Amino acid sequence: MPQATAVNPRPQSGRWWWNVRAEKKKKQEEANVPVKTKIQREIIAWFWVGLVFLLINGTIGQARVIPSGSMENTLLIGDHLIMSRVGYDAGVPFTNWHVPLWRNPKRQQVIIFKPPFAPDTPDYVKRVIGLPGETVDIHDGGVWINGQRLKENYTRGLSERPDPSFLMGNFKGLPFTVPKDCYFVMGDNRENSLDSRFWGCVPRNDIIGTPVMIYMSLEAPQGAWDSGQIRERFFAYANAVLHPRIVRWSRIFRTF
């Protein structure tokens, strides 16, 4: 009875040998490149990486850090956010100019905006409560929109009508009818938030984006995340490296 014999597949020696030669030739060419040229290539490559980052950071998204407790417990002091500007605002790179876009926020959405009473101060983060044309009032520990109580499960503390002596600018207090192209916003920590209860609505043109994700959250002393506190921020980051327990690991990668 004839026995079957193993048949060896034809080796792909030609293609393999060609790849080896090409790789060897490439390494030889790299070895012959002067060190100065290699350094120049690295500098150019990192330049383009940095330029792309700046363009994206200014036009599509930006990073933000929460300096106060006005949005607790939704956002904590030391939460580091990635903000999306897509649809809301397009920043012009290397300038303070920005172009409002087509997207409008929805009720109870968290937004980031330039405070209308102090446009040169750092951006604010609050929650949209009243939409254009709606009447907002506060009584009995709750918020009322057009006579209907708003259902909220994210607040800390009671909503209170502010004392008239704390009102700012031309804002005359509540009840308040939100003008066209404006939004009534409040912090979730109702007893510790400077918001539309004190200075009125936010114009649509001042809204620049919405938070997308928490990419880092660190415990730090009060004031460490305030604008301009470079030294305090440096020590906060260094402390996180030395003492990882101050990192709120459970909050990282939370989305909105």
Image: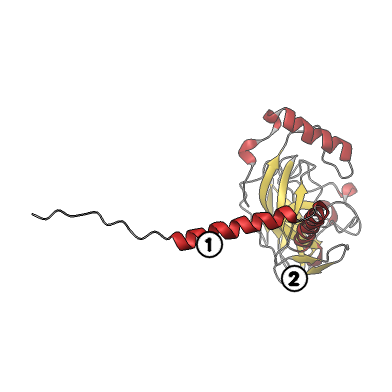
Name the residue: 76% across, 61% down: 52
Q: Camera-side residue: 32 or 61? A: 32
Name the residue: 90% across, 47% down: 165
Q: Residues within 10 Å of mark 1 (few under 14, many from 20)?
A: few
The residue pinned by badge 1 equals 18
Q: Camera-side residue: 102 or 46? A: 46
The x and y percentages for residue 69 are 76, 40
The x and y percentages for residue 162 are 81, 47
Q: Please say if 246 is above or below 68.
A: above
Give the structural element (helix, strand or loop) at label 2: loop
Q: Camera-side residue: 158 or 85? A: 85
Badge 2 or badge 1: first in the primary sequence: 1
The x and y percentages for residue 39 are 81, 53
Give the structural element (helix, strand or loop) at label 1: helix
Q: Quadrant of the rendered structure where residue 189 is?
A: top right
Do the CB atoms of the residues marked 2 and 1 lie less than 8 Å apart?
no
The quadrant of the picture occupied by the N terminus is bottom left
Q: Residues within 10 Å of mark 2 (few under 14, many from 20)?
A: some
The residue pinned by badge 2 equals 101
Q: Is residue 166 left or right of residue 110?
A: right
The residue type indicated by label 2 comes to Leu
Q: Please say if 188 is above or below 55.
A: above
